[in-house]
Image (cartoon, rainbow, N blue to C red):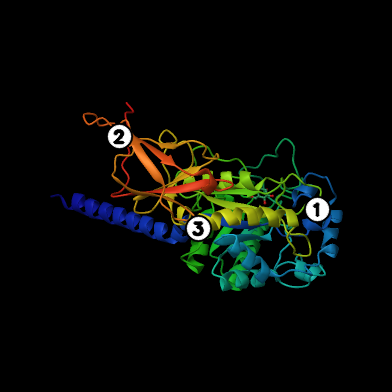
Amino acid sequence: MNKKILIFIILSLNILLAQQKEKIQNEDRLQWFKDAKFGIFIHYGIYAVNGIDESWSFYHNKISYEDYMKQLEGFTAKNYDPNKWANFFKEVGAKYAVMTSKHHDGVALWDTKLSDLSVVKKSPAKRDLLKPYADALRKVGLKVGVYFSHLDWSHPDYATVYNGNDTLPKNPNYYDVPMPGKQSKERWENFIKFRNGQLEEVFKLVNPDLWWFDGDWTRTKEQWKMKELRDLLLSWNPNVILNSRMQGYGDYATPEQGIPIYGPNGPWELCLTINNSWGYQHKDTNHKSVSYLIRIFADCISLGGNLLLDIGPMEDGSISPEQTERLKGLGRWINKHAEAIYGTERGIPFEYFLGPTTLSKDKKTLYCFVINQPKHEIIVKGIKNKIKNIRLIGTNENLNYKIVGKLYWSEVPGVLQVFIPQEKADENITVFAIDLDSPLELYSDKK
Ligand code: GLC
């Protein structure tokens, strides 16, 4: 064989092997995240003082920048008790949390040495809020996520380049784009150094298990130096997980508020507010009901995703009674049905069962979520395997079932009917497990 061809084949094989290795490593790295299913998002910041939109309120000129920053004077964190938070999150079934270390307003919750804009230097709270948060989570075995905004509407070197090219957008917002004459590639370089410097501070302080980035839409990936950023974060901690707001350099998708219908491919997490706001807003009383949150959560895990449910603590660090109540309600249901939730995988299509489902990793147990009260027999179609047993999740008692309409000469499986005594049903979603003698196989007549 020609020597060149041989070298080419060897090189290609090496590349393939390296790619395969990276894929396996990535899957291992993300395993805890895929198993976790439920996390708590925390938008904690000075915007809780007036109860207005985080950062966006001054960006959209609903309040002046000066008045927005005056909220610093009212930010006390005087009842901030991250141990209490962490215990509560654990109690309601969360496996990780993600807290805003710095939102688009640029106000840091830790003692950054690279700017004066922190609650440590500028607010009566006068202390770092990030390390106590991370320590408290780790003490109870929860993973530590840190939200960090790429963009920073307070930093003087941020609005110094346009997004991608040199032309002024139609309706320039000068928090984002340079004022006439303020364009400067050097100052943008300084901004990138500042961003990386702050990230390094946070890394040294808490070494997050997960970085939750935001605000990547204002610049190109080249301007953000996203590839370098990914490499840097993984060089600090090779196990760290990155969300997708990194223009192609993250690990998992983050649909926001809108519930996916089919769900993204690969790992993902829906971030969702309990009312309409990310941060605490006393006027926003539009809280979602517990039953709705349970339904959405079941949909997420059925489609192979996680739910990152947001709370907005008040400025003193306490969680409102309305949000507490929602978390408790969801937590009750999660704890009862833990077996059908953690460590499971995406379920089966609705054609087979009219409701959310999840599958155990060995695919030998199918969990079915009955979204309405079970007044009649529940139907599951198309299961080819032998059924060993059907159990009610929560009490683990066996349920009666029968298979109807199975013809000995036809390959179409019979219809499974499951009977749930009404008094045994959950007040929200009842879950039962179908234990199979082998990994699930579904019949299909799809042409
Ligand atoms: C959006 C908003 C931001 C919020 C985030 C949470 O990107 O800009 O205010 O923190 O969603 O996902």
Number of other residues with Cα within 10 Å of mark 2, as a class: few under 14, some 14 to 19, many 20 or more? many
Q: Secondary structure at mark 3?
A: helix
Residue type, numbered disc 1: Gly
Rendered residue at 74%/61% (across/down): 107
Residue type, numbered disc 2: Pro
Residue type, numbered disc 3: Ala
Q: Are marks 3 and 1 in contact (CB under 8 Å)?
A: no
The dot on residue 51 is: 1
Report the residue that reaches farthest toward the top. 447
Rendered residue at 55%/39% (across/down): 372
Residue 303 image position (x, y, % from top left): 48, 44
User: Does residue 88 lie above or below 379 as drawn?
Assistant: below
Q: Mark 3 against mark 2, which lies toward the viewer?
A: 2
**Badge 3 or badge 2: first in the primary sequence:** 3
- As measured in the structure, the alpha-carbon distance from the residue carrying label 3 to the one carrying label 2 is 34 Å
Quadrant (top left, top right, bottom left, bottom right) of the C terminus: top left
Q: Mark 3 against mark 1, which lies toward the viewer?
A: 3
Residue 414 image position (x, y, % from top left): 32, 34
Drawn side of residue 222 relative to residue 391, left or right:
right
Rendered residue at 71%/65% (across/down): 109
Drawn side of residue 420 relative to residue 90, left or right:
left
The dot on residue 36 is: 3
Report the residue that reaches farthest toward the left. 1
Mark 3 Cβ inside 8 Å of ligand 1: no
- As measured in the structure, the alpha-carbon distance from the residue carrying label 1 to the one carrying label 2 is 57 Å
